[in-house]
Amino acid sequence: MIGYGKMGKMIEGIALERGHEVTCRIDHNNQEDFSGETFKGSDVAIEFTTPATGYANVEKCLKAGVPVVSGTTGWVKEPSSLMEGKSRLEEMRERCDSGEGSLMWASNYSVGVNVFKAVNRQLARIMDKLGDYTPYMTETHHIHKLDHPSGTAITLADDIVAETGRLSGWSEAPESGKLIINHIREAEVPGIHTIKWDSPVDDITITHSAKSRGGFALGAVMAAEWLVGKKGYHDIDEMMEEIIN
């Protein structure tokens, strides 16, 4: 486990329930364990930390030869320091696919959210033919979440943009031709994502509301189980394809 806060402890509990051994727990106060033989001998690492540390943690896993499931958002769009013109996630994808290691990154590991993503893509394809409808998104999370919009919101927004011909991107402020994403930070809300297609006569709304962080934690453990023995870069859609089919 990399990151031993609330989410890390929840992931650990589910991993133990499913019969796995947690070989080591790395947090901000024991970074030297990345160099230890125990970590290097692990089958897979699960990384849930902060936007400021996610990239470095994934890189340490690659150097140690440990496949890693990362759920940390906020770092993937930042420019790569190694590959000019590419994002950090694109850099990691290319490094893994060239043989440096194994990585799965997802903005959200909840099985329910990934079903919601599929519904969102299909709805966007339909609505692209109906020009009177304009999409908006609102994401709500707990007050401890540092980045905004959430990684899940960005993934959902990118899918809407990809499926429609009238949007050039997304923005947190009103901007012509872009999908507006509003963010709310409130109490201990695990995560709510709402997408509304609004028209002068009616609106169509889809929402995913997490009841706890348990769904994210279970999905991360399932992803770790799936990643063991695989090489290169993978995304959660590959895992979901196997589950659904």
Image: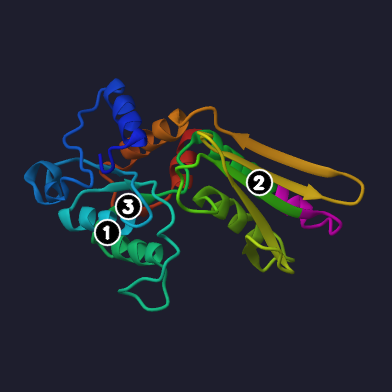
Q: Is residue 219 left or right of residue 182?
A: left
Q: Is residue 18 left or right of residue 117?
A: left
Q: CA distance from mark 1 to mark 3?
A: 13 Å
Q: CA distance from mark 2 to mark 1?
A: 32 Å
The reply to whether dot 2 and dot 1 touch (C-beta < 8 Å) is no
**Label 1 sits on residue:** 56
Q: Which residues are magenta?
A: 123-134
Determine crowd level at label 1: few under 14, some 14-19, many 20+ residues with C-alpha closer than 10 A. Answer: few
> What amino acid does circle 1 point to?
Ala
**Label 3 sits on residue:** 103
In the image, residue 124 lies at what x, y percent?
71, 52
Examine the rendered structure and indicate whether residue 175 appears above or below residue 9. below
Of 234 and 138, the residue lying toward us? 138
Residue 245 visible, this angle = no
Of 133 and 4, the residue lying toward us? 4
> What amino acid does circle 2 point to?
Asn
Residue at 20% across, 49% down: 66
Give the structural element (helix, strand or loop) at label 2. Answer: helix
Give the structural element (helix, strand or loop) at label 3. Answer: strand
The reply to whether dot 1 and dot 3 touch (C-beta < 8 Å) is no
